[in-house]
Image (tube, rainbow, N blue to C red):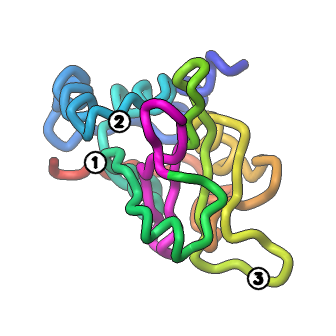
Amino acid sequence: MPGDWLERLTSQMPPRRADGGSPERRLGELASADELHMPSDYVRFVEAYGFGAVGDYLIVDRPALPPAEYLEEYESPYRAYSGNCGGVIYFATTADADDVFYLLNLHDGEGCVVVKRRHFYGAEEMWKKFDCGLLEFLVLTLDAQLPGGNPFSGTHLWGRDKPVKFVPSAY
């Protein structure tokens, strides 16, 4: 079923582009973002949607390296991405100030989603790792079936009624 994640997502959240921008333009911007090589499912998301807001809650943005100070301050179990040792790359944030990263591996250039939650309680972890890519992560979050439960501080996307609106960014 992994090949169907984009199809499942587009049935729940129809793509809508602000400027009718071509996937090639978006991917050109992505390729020049600090020379970061993002996983294929992130690239497929950008091809279909561009950058913007999922359900007025999750803002998918250009990838960036998190500053070392940020990772230290929030006691990250991960280091920032480096071409020779893997690590995390920031790519999204929520209205509740949760940050979303890819944890990239060196073997195949793919990775999994990691969320740094702003609000967590009791025995919950601030940093949550999900063994899936962005497309699967979004589908399972919208369906309230992500192993490990709701990944975010808020419930805005968890088990959300469909269709979900995607609002493209202006850039």
Which residue occupies 41% across, 57% down?
A: 66
Q: Residues within 10 Å of mark 2 (few under 14, many from 20)?
A: many
Residue highlighted by disc 1? 168
Q: Quadrant of residue 152?
A: bottom right
Whether tag 2 and tag 3 are in contact, CB under 8 A, the answer is: no
Amino acid type shown at disc 2: Tyr
- Residue 121's disc number: 3
Gap between marks 1 and 2, in whole Å? 7 Å
- Secondary structure under the numbered disc 3 in the rendered image: loop
- Indicate the position of residue 64 as horizontal and vertical percent values: 34, 49
Answer left or right for 114 relative to 124. left
Choose mark 3 or mark 1, whichever is in front.
3
Kind of residue sitting beneath label 3 = Tyr
Residue 170 x %, y %: 16, 51
Q: Residue at x 19, y 26 (%)?
A: 28
- Residue 161 counted in the magenta span: no
Q: Position of residue 2 (x, y in %)?
A: 68, 21
Per the image, label 1 sits on a secondary structure element best described as strand
Residue most extreme to the bottom: 122
Category of crowding for the residue at label 1, using alpha-carbon neighbours closer than 10 angstroms: few (below 14), some (14–19), many (at least 20) = some
Q: Are marks 1 and 2 in contact (CB under 8 Å)?
A: yes
Question: Of marks 2 and 3, which one's residue comes earlier in the chain?
Answer: 2
Which residue is outermost to the right? Answer: 123
Q: Which residue is mark 2?
A: 49
Q: Earlier in the sequence, mark 1 or mark 2?
A: 2
The quadrant the N terminus occupies is: top right
Circle 2 SS class? helix
Q: Which residues are magenta?
A: 80-102
Horizontal placement of 112 versus 11: left or right?
Answer: right
Looking at numbered disc 1 in the image, what kind of residue is underneath it? Pro
